[in-house]
Image (cartoon, grey):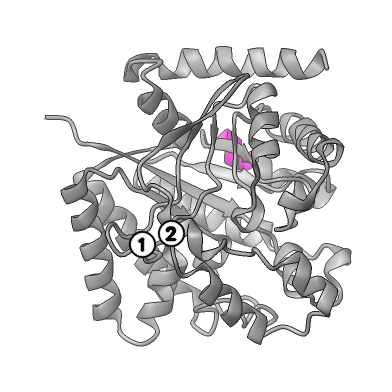
Amino acid sequence: MSKPIASLSLDLDNKWSYMKTHGDAGWDKYPTYLDLVVPRFLKVLHERELKMTVFVVGQDAAREENIEALASISAAGHEIGNHSFNHEPWLHLYSEQELVSELAKTEEHLERVTGQCPIGFRGPGFSFCDLLLRILMCRGYQYDASTFPTFLGPLARMYYFMSTRLTKEQRAERKQLFGKFSEGFRPLRPFEWAFPEGKLTEIPVTTMPLFKAPIHASYILYLSQFSQALAKIYWHMALTLCRATGVGPSLLLHPLDFMGCDDDRDLAFFPAMGRPAEPKIEIVAWMIDTMKLHHDIVPMKDHAAAISGRTAKGKLLNEDKAASGAALAFRASR
C-alpha cells in the first residue's frame, strides 16, 4: 500500500536578507553563508535519498560568490523555486510593474545559474496578494506556496519587532510580516485560486491541524531549547493529527535550522540560534525521518502535480520538463 504524499521545502534566506528584514546595518554589503549551509542540508537529504524544493532569492543568484553553492543544489536533483529578487516581506505593496520585474529578474538568474526555470513561488515572509497570484498564473507557474494558516502570525511579528530597532516607516512596511490573524482561517489542505484567466494551485505551509500552531522546523528547534522531549511530543502530535485529518504535510525548513551560534553570532535574534549547529541538525534529520515513516516525501512540484491530477507518479519528470520549457518560452515572448 502506497504512503500518502508529503512535501519538503527550504526557503534559502541568506544572511543579508535576515539583516535587511531585521533593520540591521550592513545588509547591503550582501554577507552570505550559502557556501556553509548548502552542503549541510544537501548532506542530510542525500543520506535519506530525498529530493526537496529550495526557494532561492534572485539577488543571491545574481552574485558571483553564490553561484557554486546554488548550482550544487540543482546538480543534486533538487527543485529550484522563486523566492523573489529582493526578499522584501512587503511584496503585497508592490505595483504590477514591480511584481513583474521582481519575478522576471529572478527567473533569469535562476535559469542562468541552476539551469532550472522555476514553476513554483513562495513570497518572503509569506507575503502575497491577488495581483501577484494572477501574474504568477499568467507567467506559467504551476503552484504558489505563500499561505501560512496560523492565528499566531501577529504574535510572531510582535516577538520579532521586540528585537529590532526599526523606524516607524520600516515597521509600517513590515506590518503584515508572518500574516494577519485572519490567516488562521485559511485551509490546511492544498486548494486552487480561481481567477477569470484560470486557476493556480496553492500548497499552504502546514500548521498543526485543529490548532493551527506552527510546526515547521524552526519552531520545533525553538521548543527544544526548553525541552527536547516536549519538542518531539509536539512534532509527533502534529504528524498524528495530519494523518487523522488527511492533511499531507508540507514541511518548511530554513538555513538557520542547519546553523548555530558556533557559526554566526550576528543572527542571535532568530529562534534557536543560541544553540550549536550539530544538535540542531540532528533534530531536523529526526523530524524528516519520522515524517518519512508515514509519508512519501517529494519536492513541491510533485506534490502540486499529484494534487492537480495532471500526471501519474511515473510521468512526473517528463511533464515537469515540458512545463518548464513552455513557461520559459512564454516568458521569452513577453
The residue where tag 1 is placed is 212
- Which image quadrant: the N terminus? top left
Give the residues in magenta: 72-76
Helix, strand or loop at mark 2: helix
Q: Is residue 20 shown to the viewer in this render?
A: no
Q: For the residue carrying disc 1, how many other residues have a C-alpha within 10 Å: few (<14), some (14-19), or many (20+)?
A: many
Tell me which corner region of the image, top left, top right, bottom left or bottom right, holds residue 90: bottom right
Q: Residue at x 41, y 15 (%)?
A: 310
Amino acid on which disc 2 is placed? Gly
Q: Is residue 145 shown to the viewer in this render?
A: yes
**Sooner in the amino-acid sequence: mark 2 or mark 1:** 2
Helix, strand or loop at mark 1: loop
The residue where tag 2 is placed is 184
Which of the two marks, 2 or 1, is nearer to us in this view? 2
Q: Position of residue 108 (x, y in %)?
A: 79, 31
Principal secondary structure, stretch drawn in magenta: helix
Q: Residue at x 61, y 21 (%)?
A: 196
Q: Position of residue 172 (x, y in %)?
A: 77, 70
Q: For the residue carrying disc 2, how many other residues have a C-alpha within 10 Å: few (<14), some (14-19), or many (20+)?
A: many
